Image: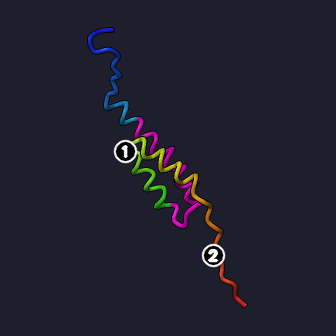
Amino acid sequence: MGKNGLRMNINATFFGQLVFYSMFIVGGLSYYLGKRKTSNPKVTALVGVLLCITPPLNLVYLIVLLLKNDEAPSNKTENSA
């Protein structure tokens, strides 16, 4: 080991690729969980994708969605009698 010890170099390309690929994964998972646990899955997916810019926040967001209670299914069909 040198004077600086062990250093981990992460270049911008690697970080950009990490953010890019995590947008698809977290966006898909957010949409799936949003369909089950919220009334607006598109907004849920958008928030998940936007939080991919800071990778720890997107994982915290997914954990919060996982721990949220499922929403009761709503009847979207009208009963005509």
Q: Position of residue 51 (x, y in %)?
A: 40, 49
Taking the view exactly as shown, the residue that stands out farthest to the right is: 81
- Please say if 67 is above or below 19: below
Q: Residue at x 44, y 56 (%)?
A: 46
- Within 10 Å of disc 2 (Cα), the crowding (few <14, some 14-19, many 20+) is few
Name the disc covering residue 24, or none: none
Local packing at callout 1 (Cα closer than 10 Å; few below 14, some 14-19, many 20+) is some
Which one is nearer the viewer's eye here, 80 or 68? 68
Q: Earlier in the sequence, mark 2 or mark 1?
A: 1
Residue under pointer 2: 76
Please state if 53 lies on the left or on the right of 64 as rendered.
left
SS type, badge 1? helix
Residue range of the region highlighted in magenta in the rendering: 18-41
The residue carrying mark 1 is 53
Residue at 58 percent across and 53 percent down: it is 67
Judged left or right of residue 10, residue 32 is right
**Magenta-colored segment: predominant secondary structure:** helix
For the residue pair 43 and 8, the one nearer the viewer reads as: 8
